[in-house]
Amino acid sequence: MSPLDTLARLRTLSARESPEVVELGKKVLDSRVKLGEQEWPIREQIAIAALDVGDVELAESQIAILSRRFPSSPRLLILQALHLESLGKYTSARIVYHCLLGKREGVEVPRLALDGDGEKEGRGGLGVGQGEGEDDGTEGVRVMAIWKGEPDECFVTAHQRLITLALYPPPSLSTGTAIQLPSTSSTTPTPSPQGIQAALPLLTRYLETFHSDPDAWSLLADLYVLSTPALAPLPTTTTQAGTEGWGIDALFANGTSHLVSLKTALQTNSSSATTKETYLPQALTSLAQQILLEPWNPRPLVRFAELSLLQGDVQVGFRTLLRCVEMMSEPFGGANDPREGDTEVKRSYEESGAGGKEWRRVMRVGGWKTRVWWDLALCTTILTNPSYQSSTSMTATPVSAKTVEAVRELVVVRLEALLGAPGVVEQWERGLMSE
């Protein structure tokens, strides 16, 4: 595949592969091949990726060319604001985003006298100065004075950047400038309580207008989980291999969701997530909205099931996980046989050295390929425990003991096949129950 085709594919997928984009972009620019109509989206793509990896000089050169070609484009304004962020001028960047949306409330805009139309105030017509020192917002005003476009309160990217700046206030926002809303990936740090408090109202207002953004609903669910007192003090991120990041995914990766769910269901810990102030219902509602928008995606369903288990609703969690297995096109591999192994997962398990009571490390092996099965293993462990008493549930009738037994057998067969480790489920259960 040629560099041009690869760049086009990455744009289509909205993939954050910034180092690869910068490398391929430089090759395309150095080749001086005629790009035609692809030139402008490619230059925009290169500029964003360059800012993300810290190659400010390359980004500036692309933004300068784009600013001469599209002086009134709101997308150009976003690039200039991202450039300001890369320089640490967050106040100026906020001013640009607010002005692009046509909203001045809550933003102090400094007075700035410009000579003429201001087009000579910054490097290459960017309107972005290169000086060091405190950011008083004047650079943002200068950018807006140069820009020739009109405000648009429905410009999604500006809203998303304001949410990101609220969630990661400087200097914590130093890990790149990807345009999208922050994800819970391992490359994104866990937000502080202050950041969550600042971002939640912005995110909820954003969703009132842009209701069809599934990633925003997913992020909202994670923020509600981190706002739950019984869960927030627990570790929500780790540097060990296989960790998904923070929020709901990290609670699974470090075993917190399984341990808390077990104690909640068996009522062995009075400090469970359901006996204190909790935002789990709001998180479940957020995930339900994402599921409605992405009915083909089993991952929000898995996360919904895990939150149901945290609330003690094992019946809902169990039925939801069974639906996730049904949604997998080939849940047991190419031959659709539950005894079929997975070479990659087996190799990862062997390399991890996990075993015995190291049940947390075992669960992290295989990622999404094994996650639903470990969740089902937890459900069957709870449902077959004599101490479990079914509470009021959204489901009409409880799952039969025969169904639970059949699912348990399937879970054991599937996990042993995936990991290539006979007895791994029993070892995991002993480790979990011993804590």
Image: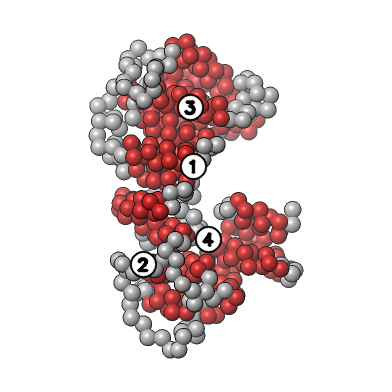
Q: Residues within 10 Å of mark 1 (few under 14, many from 20)?
A: some
- State the residue position of label 2: 103
> Which mark identifies residue 77?
none
Q: Quick check: 142 left or right of 196?
A: right
Q: Quick check: 197 left or right of 67?
A: left
Q: Which numbered mark, 4 or 1, is in the foreground of this view? A: 1
- State the residue position of label 1: 293
Identify which residue, 107 or 52, lies in the foreground: 107
Disc 3 to disc 2, C-alpha distance: 44 Å
Q: Is residue 120 above or below residue 337?
A: below
Q: Which numbered mark, 3 or 2, is in the foreground of this view? A: 2
Disc with the residue nearer the chain's start (4 vs 1): 4
Q: Residues within 10 Å of mark 2 (few under 14, many from 20)?
A: some
> Which mark identifies residue 321?
3
Q: Under tag 4, what secondary structure? A: helix
Disc with the residue nearer the chain's start (1 vs 3): 1
The amino acid type found where label 3 is placed reads Leu
Is the residue under label 3 in contact with that under label 1 (CB below 8 Å)?
Answer: no
- Where residue 63 sits in the image (x, y, percent)? 56, 72
Disc 4 to disc 1, C-alpha distance: 29 Å
For the image, the number of numbered tags is 4
- Where residue 109 sits in the image (x, y, percent)? 33, 74
Q: Residue at x 57, y 74 (%)?
A: 70
Q: Residue at x 58, y 52 (%)?
A: 15
Is the residue under label 2 in contact with that under label 3 (CB below 8 Å)?
Answer: no
Q: Under tag 3, what secondary structure? A: helix
Res. 57 in view? no
Q: Residues within 10 Å of mark 4 (few under 14, many from 20)?
A: many
Q: Is residue 142 above or below residue 269?
A: below
- Where residue 133 sits in the image (x, y, percent)? 38, 75
